[in-house]
Amino acid sequence: MTLTLAEILMARGTIKGVADATPLVPATAISRILGTELLLKLEICQPIGAFKLRGAYNAVTSLPDGAIGVTCCSTGNHGRGVAFAARQRGLRAVVCMSELVPQAKIDGIRALGAEISITGKSQDAALAESLRLCRDEGLTEISPFDDPRVIAGQGTIGLEILEQRPDVGTLLVPLSGGGLAGGVALAAKAINPAIKVIGISMDRGAAMVASIKAGHPIEVKEYASLADSLGGGIGLQNKLSFQLCRDLLDDIILVTEEEIRDAMQMLFFEERIVAEGACVVGIAALKAGKLPPSTKPMATILTGRNLDMQIFTQIMTGQDITLGDMHLKGRQYTSPL
Ligand SMILES: *Cc1c(COP(=O)(O)O)cnc(C)c1O
């Protein structure tokens, strides 16, 4: 499997008017507080509330005419993208998810007309079910991150950011299976080889960073996280996203659940933006002083807004939260401005 800028440019034509070009806006208050110019790519404005529509639509659109239906495993947002794209093409869609996926995400997928299958406690279990459906029912698997058409779709975000602000020096990209970071890094570095692309994951269960350290894809234990969209493995048979992230990312930074919570509060109270925990890992890393200082503007991708509003309300009102085996103490936000 190969992927070049040409496929990403083609993907842009395919998704035009469906997975729309999103705004890149200044995070004015956060930039003042952190003393560095930060821009936000608003993928929360996509029709499904997350960037995953780009890759899913590009992949589903390019299926041959004889396809009878699609299936995928998902932490929630890819399934929503696949459901949306399959409905447009009049195809059956089955979305396989683990028990860790929040109800709000499941409801959103069902509302788009897809069938739901909940299996086990990990993405790997959901993937196994999705592959079984391919074998037994003739459906086509659309990987959330390890498919060249999916990665090309996500890479269109990199094209847009560099067109919108060619002066950006560093991209902070939320990282899970690496389709987003791999595609964005490929596009951005093809246009500006000097740009830095940094992947950010939560510190519990970050499969890509563990795999890169090991030199090959490995499995890690999965934990409940505020960044639930970043959960899951990269697949032991990973073909493309592992290699792209290993070769193209300048660094990978890990953030704690406390840092994610604080960044969610900061984004909401300072910028009035509602976004998933997975989106704010870049802001969390900056705020925690985990990134090298930069004189050029930085941009991060607000990848999705499909969160559980009860947890969101608890975080914003300073209540304690339970995440699986972890107890996260509440904390009231006070603005330094
Ligand atoms: C899927 C997802 C990511 C991570 O994308 P990968 O391609 O798996 O690395 C980040 N944020 C949100 C909201 C997502 O749904």
Image (cartoon, rainbow, N blue to C red):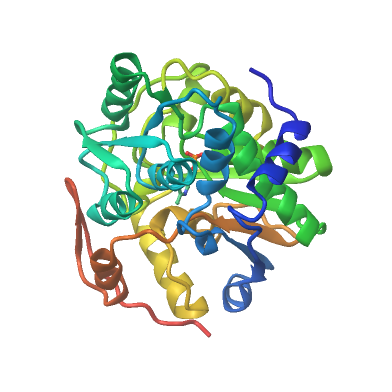
- 156 vs 102, left or right, is right
- 72 vs 194, left or right, is left
Visible residue check, residue 193: no
Q: Residue at x 53, y 59 (%)?
A: 46
For the residue pair 324 and 191, the one nearer the viewer reads as 191
Q: Residue at x 68, y 39 (%)?
A: 11
Q: How many marks?
A: 0
Which percent across, then down, holds residue 207?
Answer: 42, 31
Visible residue check, residue 32: yes
- 241 vs 75, left or right, is right
Which percent across, then down, holds residue 118?
Answer: 21, 36
In the image, is residue 238 above or below residue 295?
A: above
Residue 306, quarter of picture: bottom left
Q: Residue at x 34, y 48 (%)?
A: 228
Which percent across, then down, holds residue 274?
Answer: 43, 70
- 269 vs 312, left or right, is right
Which quadrant of the figure contains the N terminus? top right
In the image, is residue 294 above or below residue 174?
A: below
For the residue pair 290 and 57, the one nearer the viewer reads as 57
Which percent across, then down, holds residue 30?
Answer: 57, 73
> As drawn, which residue projects farthest toward the bottom?
337
For the residue pair 178 and 8, the one nearer the viewer reads as 8
For the residue pair 69 and 72, the one nearer the viewer reads as 69
In the image, is residue 32 above or below residue 226?
A: below
Q: Residue at x 17, y 45 (%)?
A: 325
